[in-house]
């Protein structure tokens, strides 16, 4: 009897038990906009903010809003971005603080007029688990190629000034 108990406990198959998969939300897939390329990047963190870049459009000569058409000085670049609050307290996320770095090393700030014309948010309060999706617009020289989004999540309890951004390569 003791031998059969020993044999049965020793023959567990040798495979470690896998934890059951965590449940996930079923979000419907959406088509990529005609002038945009889908980005398949991993999420990045800056402080207590998670950044997930999902789309990129380059070479846009102008933008049309509800009341005006706006010509680029060079070319508009549009980044589709999802940000999520990951901290225990809320932060004020400033869309205008984000920067685009080109292949030549130029650092370009968000184009405020383009953001206003396209009615994109200025500042958003991100509580824990709050997720917001929007576009960032930049006006780059015509020949410039965007390389990196320098993302700034916002002040946190441990970094009140949030001086250091997180660089996210676009490809």
Image: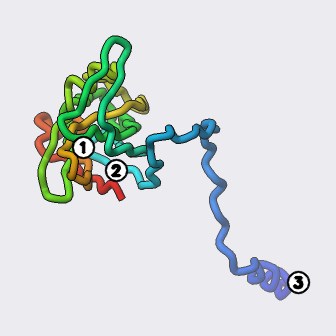
Residue marked by disc 1: 151
The CA distance from mark 1 to mark 3 is 66 Å
The local crowd at label 3, few if under 14, some if 14 to 19, many if 20 or more residues have their Cα within 10 Å, is: few
Q: Helix, strand or loop at disc 1?
A: strand
The extreme top residue here reads 67
The picture places residue 81, in percent across and down from the top left corner, at: 38, 38
Which residue is at 19% across, 50% downward? 101
Q: Which of the two residues, 99 or 22, is positioned nearer the viewer here? A: 99
CB within 8 Å, label 1 to label 2: yes
Q: Is residue 102 above or below residue 83?
A: below
**Which comes sooner in the sequence, label 3 or label 2?**
3
Residue 1 has which mark? 3
Residue 73 higher or lower than 167, as above or below:
above
Assign a secondary structure to mark 3: loop
Q: Earlier in the sequence, mark 1 or mark 3?
A: 3
Q: Is residue 42 left or right of residue 22?
A: left
How crowded pointer 2 is (Cα within 10 Å; few <14, some 14-19, many 20+) is rated as: some
The residue indicated by pointer 2 is: 44
Q: List the single residue furthest toward the right.
A: 1
- Tell whether label 2 touches label 3 (CB within 8 Å): no
Spatial CA distance of label 3 from label 2 is 57 Å
Q: Position of residue 96 (x, y in %)?
A: 21, 30
Q: Position of residue 145 (x, y in %)?
A: 25, 54
In this rendering, position of residue 83 left or right of residue 92: right
Q: Could you tell me which quadrant the N terminus lies in?
A: bottom right
Callout in the foreground (1, 2)? 1
Q: Quadrant of residue 125?
A: top left
Give the camera-side residue of 109 and 7: 109
């Amino acid at each position: 009897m003791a031998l059969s108990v020993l044999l049965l406990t020793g023959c567990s198959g040798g495979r470690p038990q896998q934890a059951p998969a965590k449940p996930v939300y079923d979000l419907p897939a959406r088509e990529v906009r005609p002038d945009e390329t889908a980005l398949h990047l991993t999420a990045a963190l800056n402080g207590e903010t998670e950044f997930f870049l999902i789309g990129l459009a380059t070479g846009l000569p102008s933008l049309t809003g509800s009341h005006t058409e706006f010509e680029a000085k060079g070319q508009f670049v549009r980044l589709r971005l999802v940000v999520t609050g990951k901290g225990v307290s809320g932060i004020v996320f400033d869309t205008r603080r984000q920067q685009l770095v080109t292949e030549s090393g130029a650092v370009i700030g968000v184009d405020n007029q383009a953001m206003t014309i396209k009615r994109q948010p200025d500042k958003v309060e991100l509580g824990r688990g709050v997720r917001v999706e929007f576009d960032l617009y930049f006006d780059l020289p015509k020949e410039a190629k965007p390389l990196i989004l320098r993302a700034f999540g916002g002040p946190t309890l441990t970094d009140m000034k949030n001086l250091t951004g997180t660089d996210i390569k676009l490809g």
